[in-house]
Image: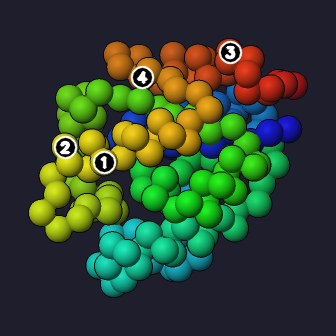
C-alpha cells in the first residue's frame, strides 16, 4: 500500500481533500503541519517567529523526512517542497500528488498568512511565493490535479481514479 502525499500551495485543499480521500481508501490521514506542531508543542507561526524562516524550514524538513507511514494520505505544508531530504523520503514511500490552483482562486481562499503559518520571506508577496514554489511542486509531482473550479469531492474522485497511483480500495 503506497502512501499518497499531497503537495501544493496553502489553501489548495491538501488537508480537506486528504481527509476525504483517506476515508474513501480506508487509509490513515496525516497532516504534516500538525505533526510538527505536536512534536514542538507550538503553533506553526510561533515556530516561524521563534526560529526564523530558515530555522523553520530546517525543522520542517527534518520532521517530514522522519514520517513513517504505510497506507496513509499525507497532507504536507506548502513549504515542504523546500526540504530535499523530506521530498526524497516522500518519493520513496508514496506517490506525490500536486493540487494545482490558479493564483486568483488561491488568493480568494487564503486568509491571514501569518496566522496560517505560511513561510513568507521578508518583502515577498503571495504572488512572489506562488511563482517561486510552482516549479518545485511540478518537479516533485508524480501526478498533477487541476483544482480550478472543482469542489473537494471532485478533486478527491480525480485522485482516486488515477490508476497510476496503484491504490486498491477495500
State the image coordinates of residue 136 (x, y, percent, origin top left): 44, 45
Describe residue 98's horizontal placement relative to residue 149 as left or right. Answer: right
Closer to the observer: label 1 or label 3? Answer: 1
Q: Quadrant of residue 123?
A: bottom left
Residue under pointer 4: 147
> Mark 2 or mark 4, which has the lower sequence index?
2
Q: Secondary structure at mark 1?
A: helix
Q: Is residue 80 depicted above or below 20 in this figure? A: below
State the image coordinates of residue 143 (x, y, percent, origin top left): 59, 27
Describe residue 164's horizontal placement relative to residue 48 as left or right. Answer: right
Numbered label attached to residue 127: 2
Q: CA distance from mark 2 to mark 4?
A: 18 Å
> Mark 2 or mark 3, which has the lower sequence index?
2
Task: Name the one closer to the observer, 24 or 114.
Answer: 114
Task: Name the one closer to the observer, 33 or 98.
Answer: 98
Closer to the observer: label 2 or label 3? Answer: 2
Q: CA distance from mark 1 to mark 4?
A: 19 Å
Q: Secondary structure at mark 2?
A: helix
Residue under pointer 1: 132
Closer to the observer: label 1 or label 4? Answer: 1
Q: Quadrant of residue 104?
A: top left
Residue name at image x 63 percent, y 47 percent: 74
> Mark 2 or mark 1, which has the lower sequence index?
2
* Crowd class of label 2 (few under 14; some 14 to 19; many from 20; radius 10 Å): few
Q: Is residue 158 depicted above or below 102 in this figure? A: above
Residue name at image x 73 percent, y 22 percent: 164
Amino acid at each position: 500500500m503506497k502512501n499518497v502525499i499531497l503537495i501544493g500551495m496553502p489553501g489548495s485543499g491538501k488537508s480537506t481533500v486528504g481527509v476525504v480521500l483517506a476515508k474513501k481508501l480506508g487509509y490513515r490521514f496525516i497532516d504534516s503541519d500538525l505533526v510538527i506542531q505536536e512534536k514542538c508543542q507550538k503553533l506553526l507561526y510561533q515556530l516561524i517567529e521563534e526560529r526564523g524562516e530558515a530555522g523553520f524550514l530546517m525543522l520542517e524538513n527534518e520532521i517530514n523526512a522522519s514520517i513513517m507511514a504505510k497506507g496513509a494520505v499525507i497532507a504536507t505544508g506548502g513549504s515542504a517542497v523546500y526540504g530535499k531530504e523530506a521530498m526524497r523520503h516522500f518519493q520513496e514511500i508514496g506517490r506525490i500528488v500536486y493540487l494545482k490552483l490558479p493564483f486568483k482562486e488561491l488568493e480568494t481562499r487564503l486568509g491571514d498568512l501569518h496566522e496560517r503559518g505560511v513561510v513568507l520571506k521578508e518583502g515577498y508577496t503571495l504572488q512572489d511565493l506562488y511563482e517561486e514554489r510552482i516549479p518545485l511542486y511540478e518537479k516533485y509531482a508524480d501526478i498533477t490535479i487541476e483544482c480550478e473550479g472543482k469542489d473537494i469531492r471532485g478533486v478527491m474522485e480525480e485522485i482516486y481514479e488515477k490508476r497510476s497511483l496503484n491504490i486498491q480500495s477495500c
